Image (cartoon, rainbow, N blue to C red):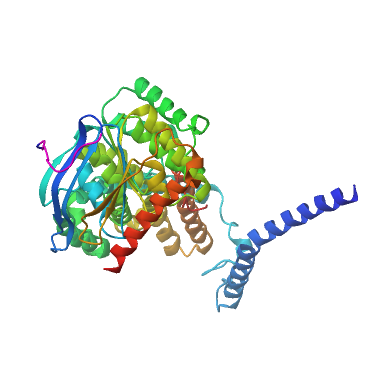
């Protein structure tokens, strides 16, 4: 993977953790999915991606993670340190919560004692130390998602990719998970790309919100979110917060009318 | 107080109801079955020998065991043991070979496509057509009977292993791909555990088939000690209807034992985590 120095995108804070330049992707049946996408994400920056349903947001994440090769374009990612949180928790049902968190370390060859300790700490950091020995079927949707977060967290990724992770949990659990995620973001110092359908979730979590166009997806707008971290849940009810949400919603409506 | 008593009697009534709901259906079927059996036993012409009164074709249920003592009982017990051995050895072989074949076929589509037609052919070929060939190759002994057992019971293990390995969710594969896992780690830590409920389902079907295989093997390959199949033939030729039916019941019992054994194993190993576990 080549590192690129794009001129037209100033990066945020410090060195860019990840950059993509002119990413295009077409499937073998020649449907064009991604068109000329260039983004740069700084160290310890939180970026959300919103866009019309089915536009290719998840595909963009798969490209950034290395699961999907782009047809053309240059990509610079910390390929060994990417955490991916899927839309569903993707826990291995035959493993307990703790053993699920251990999975990735196990695949990387970390010895049993170390990985058990690391896994237990990660599980504690998402508040699930008590459920370490439960099987996924004994956990609620929100708890499963926390185990999934802990599983990625334990490898200490430099880049964290989230594919609508909280779409299936209820509103209350979702706000709680958002706060937990921000707490993890503050302590674990990763860069994050977060795909979501929820405008307020995107605004609440991130420093920038990328708005994608309908398929073939390209970057239509980038909205800066002016709030400092740590953010309290109350900012959701401030006029500036509503203004950000309104701007994004307006852009999305326009994109869907085209 | 009164309220408490009532709630206690209510739960007792609920409990009774659940018992009735559970055993009512099987009970009715059993009664109908036994009634049909009696109707046959006493309705058939010449079912009882005019001289001695012993049943010739089908003994009524309460007279099933009247000739089962001494040498006859010993014969049935030994045959039961031999058939148990044949089915277990055959099933063990079928499981090992079936798992390996399933895993091999899951590695490449072309392998699957190449082997599949022949496995179906093996599955539907009447054993009698290959009896001469098998006598030539392995003889007419225990080994031949085990081979029949393997041929009859292997298919569900292969097909369920293959199906199970193929049905691992794509996201889980992605998870392993992101860690750059090789095919062996993927097989051992992802695909085989994910396939285990399907594999156990196959094993349970195969356990029943293995008993059929052991008995069918007896019909064609008669060297050595007789198993249940050969004993049934003997009693048939001697017109011993009672012992013949008891031997058939012993075969049923053997099949049931293996089926329950694998059901329990499945519950212990897979039941802990598998949400769709089939109830006993």
Residue A55 lies, with reference to residue A40, above or below; the image says below
Residue A235 image position (x, y, % from top left): 48, 42
Residue A89 image position (x, y, % from top left): 39, 45
- For residue A68, side relative to residue A208 (left or right): left
Q: Residue at x 50, y 50 (%)?
A: A171
Foreground residue among A9 and B120: A9
Q: Quick check: is A9 in the magenta stretch? A: yes
Tally of numbered tags = 0
**Magenta span dominant secondary structure:** loop
- For residue B47, side relative to residue B261 (left or right): right
Q: Is residue B221 visible?
A: no
Residue B36 image position (x, y, % from top left): 59, 73
Q: Quadrant of the C terminus of chain A?
A: bottom left
Q: Quick check: is A202 in the magenta stretch? A: no
Q: Is residue A142 visible?
A: yes
Residue A200 lies, with reference to residue B122, above or below; the image says above
Foreground residue among B90 and A172: A172
Q: Quadrant of the N terminus of chain A?
A: top left
Residue A52 lies, with reference to residue B195, above or below; the image says below
Q: Quadrant of residue B54?
A: bottom right
Image: magenta residue range: A3-12
């Amino acid at each position: 993977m080549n590192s690129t120095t794009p001129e037209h995108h100033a990066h945020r804070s410090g060195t860019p953790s990840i950059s993509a330049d002119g990413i295009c992707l077409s499937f073998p049946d020649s449907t064009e999915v991604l068109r000329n996408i260039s983004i740069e994400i700084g160290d310890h920056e939180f970026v959300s991606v919103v866009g019309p349903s089915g536009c290719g947001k998840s595909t963009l994440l798969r490209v950034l993670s290395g699961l999907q090769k782009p047809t053309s374009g240059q990509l610079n990612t910390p390929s060994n340190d990417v955490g991916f949180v899927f839309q569903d928790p993707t826990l291995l049902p035959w493993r307990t919560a703790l053993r699920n968190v251990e999975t990735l370390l196990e695949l990387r060859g970390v010895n049993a004692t170390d990985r058990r300790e690391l896994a237990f700490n990660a599980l504690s950091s998402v508040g699930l130390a008590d459920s370490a020995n439960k099987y996924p079927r004994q956990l609620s949707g929100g708890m499963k998602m926390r185990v999934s977060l802990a599983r990625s967290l334990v490898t200490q990724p430099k880049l964290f990719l989230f594919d609508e992770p909280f779409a299936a949990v209820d509103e209350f659990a979702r706000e709680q998970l958002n706060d937990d995620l921000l707490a993890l973001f503050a302590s674990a110092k990763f860069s994050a790309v977060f795909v979501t359908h929820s405008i307020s979730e995107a605004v609440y979590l991130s420093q920038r919100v990328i708005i994608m166009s309908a398929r073939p997806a390209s970057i239509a707008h980038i909205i800066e979110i002016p709030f400092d971290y740590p953010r309290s849940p109350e900012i959701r009810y401030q006029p500036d917060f509503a203004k950000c949400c309104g701007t994004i919603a307006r852009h999305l409506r326009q994109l869907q009318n085209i | 107080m009164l309220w408490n008593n009532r709630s206690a009697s209510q739960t007792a009534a609920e409990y009774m109801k659940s018992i009735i709901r559970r055993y009512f259906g099987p009970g009715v079927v059993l009664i109908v079955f036994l009634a049909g059996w009696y109707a046959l036993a006493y309705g058939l012409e010449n079912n009882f020998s005019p001289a001695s009164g012993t049943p010739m074709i089908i003994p009524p249920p309460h007279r099933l065991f009247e000739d089962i003592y001494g040498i006859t009982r010993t014969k049935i017990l030994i045959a039961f043991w031999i058939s148990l051995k044949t089915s277990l050895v055959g099933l063990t072989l079928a499981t090992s070979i079936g798992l390996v074949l399933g895993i091999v076929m899951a590695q490449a589509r072309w392998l699957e496509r190449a082997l599949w037609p022949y496995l179906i052919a093996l599955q539907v070929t009447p054993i009698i057509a290959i009896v001469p060939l098998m006598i030539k190759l392995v003889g007419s002994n225990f080994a031949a009977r085990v081979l029949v057992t393997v041929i009859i019971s292997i298919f569900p293990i292969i097909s369920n292993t293959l199906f199970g390995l193929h049905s691992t969710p794509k996201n889980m594969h992605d998870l392993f791909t992101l860690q750059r896992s090789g095919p062996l780690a993927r097989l051992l830590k992802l695909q085989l555990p994910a396939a285990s409920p399907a594999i156990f389902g196959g094993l349970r079907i195969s356990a029943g088939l293995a008993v059929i295989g052991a008995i069918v093997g007896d019909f064609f390959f008669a060297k050595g000690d007789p198993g249940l199949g050969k004993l049934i033939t003997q009693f048939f030729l001697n017109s011993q209807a009672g012992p013949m039916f008891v031997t058939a019941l012993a075969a049923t019992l053997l099949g049931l034992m293996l089926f329950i054994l694998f059901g329990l194993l499945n519950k212990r190993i897979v039941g802990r985590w598998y949400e769709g576990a089939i109830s006993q």
